[in-house]
Amino acid sequence: MGRQPSAKPTSFDIAYLAGVSQPTVSRALRGSKSVSAATRANIQRIAQELNYTVDKNASSLRSQRTHTLALLFFEDPNPDESMINPFFLSMLGSITRECARRGYDLLISFQQMHNDWHVTYQDSHRSDGIILLGYGDYQLYLTKLEHLVEMGTKFVRWGSVSEDGIGLTVGSDNVGAGEQAGAHLVEIGRRRIAFLGDASDHAPEFQDRYDGLCRAMRAAGLEPDPALQRDAVSSEDSGYAAARSLIESGQSFDAVFAASDLIAIGAMRALAEAGLRLPQDVAIIGFDDIPAASLTTPTLTTVMQDMKGAGTLLVDALLARIDDRPVEQRILPARLIRRQSTAV
Amino acid sequence: MGRQPSAKPTSFDIAYLAGVSQPTVSRALRGSKSVSAATRANIQRIAQELNYTVDKNASSLRSQRTHTLALLFFEDPNPDESMINPFFLSMLGSITRECARRGYDLLISFQQMHNDWHVTYQDSHRSDGIILLGYGDYQLYLTKLEHLVEMGTKFVRWGSVSEDGIGLTVGSDNVGAGEQAGAHLVEIGRRRIAFLGDASDHAPEFQDRYDGLCRAMRAAGLEPDPALQRDAVSSEDSGYAAARSLIESGQSFDAVFAASDLIAIGAMRALAEAGLRLPQDVAIIGFDDIPAASLTTPTLTTVMQDMKGAGTLLVDALLARIDDRPVEQRILPARLIRRQSTAV
DNA sequence: ATATTATGCGTATACGTATACCCTATGGCG
DNA sequence: CGCCATAGGGTATACGTATACGCATAATAT
């Protein structure tokens, strides 16, 4: 009770003090060239003094531009609560920074795929565009994407770029990364390389990684054995289960390429429990280079994605989309990080 | 280019179709009781059919309520880029979920403390309130908080509850947690317990943890040795440096309580390099229970904070603040997780 | 039967900004 | 010296919603 600033100043207040009309204030502050330098400077000074800020809602309502992006993150059906995609954080960091740099706000929301998110954000004028990260049910995802396209909603998504997908996609070079991993394993003399991760079209990124592995093996004259592939989603438990299934099948193998570090960490536990020595008996490579990867015993060879570049590129691409500038799909390079788990 | 929905429907469209006036539509959809059940049902049906959503900007402009919260995360001056507070993610998850449950949107922004964030979010009507996480320069932080209070801005912050702080604070029971850790170390026979982490008023939470440790030691008839305390910020490198400094000082110690897991992990590296056996020669306890804590060798005893509860509580408290309902400071319990690093 | 109150809804208007349009002084040009 | 382009800025209005009020009709009280 009794706050000294009687109320938030409006553009009318500024206009009054500057001896001009309200529209002139608006023009001056938004950089219109039809206002003289002197007038603009004066207006800016007064605005500064009064701590004036443009009312976001009024501005958005009138201009139909919110200068806000929405980031929708889709969770897996049963998320390993304690370990939600660790690598997501650095991407989030670079996305928020890039947004700030461009003068955009960022709305964030963790979603279940079955929600009506595809209606909420654009139709209610909350944001100018949407960034999509992850997905639960891939088929449902595609359906909703089609709906977005129909509605003319602007969006970009993180994922597999190789598929001729719906909408604009930014992603790592998963195939190339898989090749690097495969080549490395072949180089250290491994012949029977297992793959842990969904290799179906439910998880295009994982499939790309598998494709890359297969390509590297064939290039070395080896034929990938389908019996050495096990489905797994990105969680430690799932990796553990997949590795156990592999061990119990009695198949012989001397290397494992896991589609994510979480899977790899779970698999390492299973392998160690089975008395297999890492990396002598089984070499293992993960994917993502999460912080934990350098703490495992042995430390985990993995593939590092350019998460910072990813955030920047996603925002870049989305803004281009919004402004109807041309954009093409962009693939980010990934790099193999060699650690003890493949050091023979 | 030829989109079939001629335009986003407005409340006028609904009103026309329902044979009522626009305000009635607004009333019906917002649950005003001065509209008959029949009318309301009819309006809702039509709105549903047209995929109508309330325009967020218009609504916020008129009602002066944005139904949006802003989450400001302050980064340390030199963030260990790859490992930004890992425990932050689960909190973020619970905050977004809680917001969604209450029908609030969440704006997120990583900030440098020196920015004018304290003006931007409330004054421009972007959000109804602010959640503050972390801080860089603590003194500067306090200054800006005072400014927020002056302006009548609604906010809550995560931090040390014990200080009779500015504004409303939600935080873990750091003192209690420190006591638990100390008691545990004493229980396994340790007498010379070092503390790694800033114990100054620049980092109230760390100081609370240290106070807790001291209290537990005194309760056991031990006097904490100030020479065994080393400043450290929450990063692996800083922990490593602090531990090295401790080792090189020649002080004898048989346990380490680190103010965060990152510090602990760095310290473990330094201790191992110095040929000290963990936990036989030196037992060690961290704080946060980040995923990596269960992957170190030996696995790390640590304190788990209730991050999910934290997110819920922060949102809860802020909404209460916004609605001018009474709220008191809330302290969340923390729990010691015993692992190999203190198993003797 | 008349006065009173509640119910359900329409009328008018405000929220604060951005833009289309219009007008007035210049200055340049022939 | 008259004509037109241009700079600079004012006037009017729209963006879509939420609320203060007022006014009927119906329900209840007296």
Image: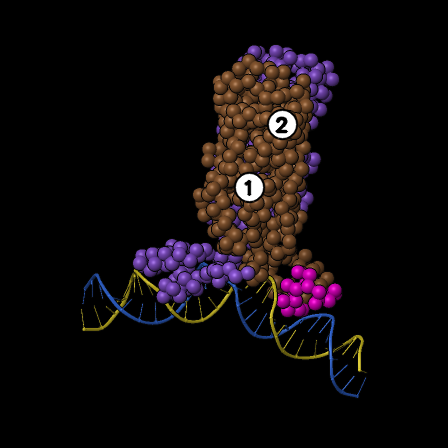
Chain colours: A purple, B brown, C blue, D yellow
Dot 2: chain letter = B
Q: Secondary structure under badge 1?
A: strand
x, y percentage for residue D27? 79, 75
* Amino acid at the residue labelled 1: Leu
Which residues lie in the magenta part?
B19-39
Q: Is residue D3 above or below residue B281?
A: below
Q: Position of residue A98 (x, y in %)?
A: 47, 41
The chain ID associated with circle 1 is B
Q: Quadrant of residue D3?
A: bottom left
> Would residue B17 appear left or right of B275 to someone viewing this image?
right
The residue identified by callout 1 is B133
Q: Quadrant of the C terminus of chain B?
A: top right
- For label 1, the crowd category at 10 Å Cα-Cα, with few meaning under 14, some 14 to 19 and many 20 or more, is some
Q: Position of residue A319 (x, y in %)?
A: 48, 45
Q: Which residue occupies 53% across, 32% down?
A: B199
Give me the C-alpha separation between circle 1 and circle 2. Answer: 31 Å
Q: Is residue B147 visible?
A: yes
Residue at horizontal 62 percent and vertical 56 percent from the top: B323
Query: Hey, which quadrant is residue B341 in on the image?
Result: top right
Mark 2 belongs to which amino acid? Answer: Met
Q: Residue at x 48, y 47 (%)?
A: B144
Residue A11 magenta-highlighted:
no
